[in-house]
Each structure stands twice: as C-alpha cells, then as structure tokens.
Image (cartoon, grey):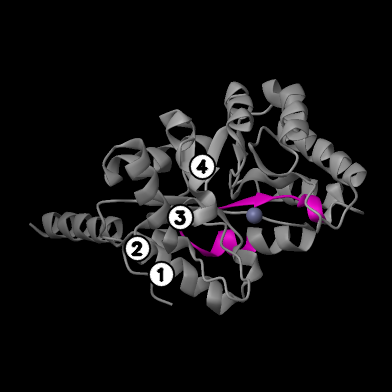
Amino acid sequence: MLYRLPLHRIRYADSHVHLDQYDDRAAAGLVARARAAGVREMLLVSTGVLSSRRTVALARGFPGVAAAVGVHPRNAGGMDVDAIRRLVAANRDVVRAVGEIGLDRDGGARAPLKAQTVAFQVQLGLAAAEGLPAVIHAVAAHKQVAAMLGAMRAQLPGVVIHYFAGAEDDLRRYLALDCHISFGRLLLKPEGEPLHRLVPLVPAQRLLVETDTYPLPGRQTEPMDVAGVVRLVAALRGEPLGRTAALTSDNFRSLFGPVPDLPAFRPLAVARRRARRLYRRARRRL
Ligand SMILES: [Zn+2]
C-alpha cells in the first residue's frame, strides 16, 4: 500500500487507537487515511496479551505509530504479567507505554473488582520499573483509580486518563496528580456536553486527544476523526485549530517520545541524499 506524504500544515496525534482489532488490510487502510488527513502520530493501545503482541507487530509496520502494551481491566482475570513484561523487554523501541490498565465498575465488566485491582497494581509496578507512562481506563471508579495512582505517581514518568468522562472533582483530582487528560469523541455527542465546561480547566501541557477507534457494529470511528475532536477542543479553549493541534501533538511527543516515520515514508530526505550523491560524483569527474 502506498502512503501519501501528508502535506497538511496541521498535524494531529491520536493518543488511543485499537488497531489490533482490525485485520491487516483494514488496519493499513485506517493508517493511510489518517495520514492523508494529517494524523502523523498514533498510540496503539492493547487490551490483553494477544492484543499486545499484535499491537507491537502493527506498530513496527507503520510510520508514526507507537505501542502501549497491557491488560484491560475487563480482561484482568488470569492475567499473565510476565508475558507483558517480556514483550516490553523485547520491544523497547516501539513500546512507549503500559496500557490500557485501570478499573472498570460498569455493570458489564467481566473481571471481579479484586482481580482488576491486582492487575492494575501489578501493571502500574511494571510501568514504574520500565520507566514507561501508564494509559488509564477508569469507568465508575475515579476515586479508587486516583488513590492507586497517587500512591505510585512519583515513580511513573507520565499518566494518561484516557477518554475522560468524569465530573469536575475527578478532573481536579487527576490534575493534582499531574495526569494528562485525553478527550475523545464523547465531546461531540449530546451526552458529552457536560464535559465542555471542563475542557478549558486542563492546562495546555496536559491536554491530549483521541478517537478510541475500535470496531463496533454501527460505530464508525477512525483515527482521521481526531481532527473533529481537536476542532471542538480548540473552540472550547478559544484558540485557533492549529494551536490546539500543535500542543496536543507536542504533548504526545513529550510523553511517548518521538515516533519516527519509517525511512520509506521520508521521500524528501531520500531525494536530498540522492542529490548529494549525484553532486559528489559530478564533482569528482571535474
Ligand atoms: Zn481503549
């Protein structure tokens, strides 16, 4: 597949994408469309051991894409933390975070809260030991999550509260812990309207955006849609779209590190190298 060089002046970064839930062809299509729309960086987030393996493999295959590995609270029962640890150790170049991890007290959650708490604690320990930021899933459990994060925060290089959907108290608790807050497409829906008031409370250097792309019948979200989230966040912050896009991209890079484009996706650098070579050859002939 041919990836068009993004010519957009505005570059976006999507902090939460479940690309492993798609087959190779669909995943390649999503990345290509995102790049064409100006999305230059993405964090692929995992939900279990198999998901983490596939996420790492996908991150290796695409430009501007990094991986988070970990076990989602809903899959916390019988978690194999050693498998995750080995995956991190063998792939330090593309693994830039541990996630998604946390607590989910929603009625549909499969793992009991006790197993979730153990899995969360162990994986926070892994993130701390490896010096990686943690990507947090918190549903109906903000107080408990904040308490567990508080005990570990000094040892973690960064914490992202993904798809933030809590109340003002929750937001303030996370901000006091110096967490990044990632807003998703919920902002664009009627039920996300109470969040609009909270967006400007997040300091510029703690702001991230995401699509939480995964396949669900009737749900058509993909990483290129992150532009719509940035547009609304910019309006709520009262600043130009380009400014919000730049600061969320900068925050992505300072948290997860720069994610290099694959050499094949840097045609200008290749052309420059070739021109230099031709020039040297021509001079030798003189
Ligand atoms: Zn997710």
Give the quarter the ligand 1 occupies. bottom right
Pointer 1 residue = 33
Indicate yes or no: mark 4 CB to ligand 1 under 8 Å.
no
Q: Nearer the viewer, mark 2 or mark 3?
A: 3
Counting from the top left corner in percent of width and height, residue 29 is at 47, 74
Helix or strand or loop: what does disc 4 sit on?
A: helix
Amino acid type of the residue tagged 3 in the rendering:
Leu
Amino acid type of the residue tagged 1 in the rendering:
Arg
Magenta range is 57-74
Q: CA distance from mark 3 to mark 4?
A: 10 Å
Amino acid type of the residue tagged 4 in the rendering:
Leu
Amino acid type of the residue tagged 2 in the rendering:
Ala
Counting from the top left corner in percent of width and height, residue 7 is at 25, 60
Residue at 26% x, 42% y is: 240
Q: CA distance from mark 3 to mark 1?
A: 21 Å
Residue at 75% x, 39% y is: 141
Whether residue 138 sits left or right of residue 78 in the image: it is left
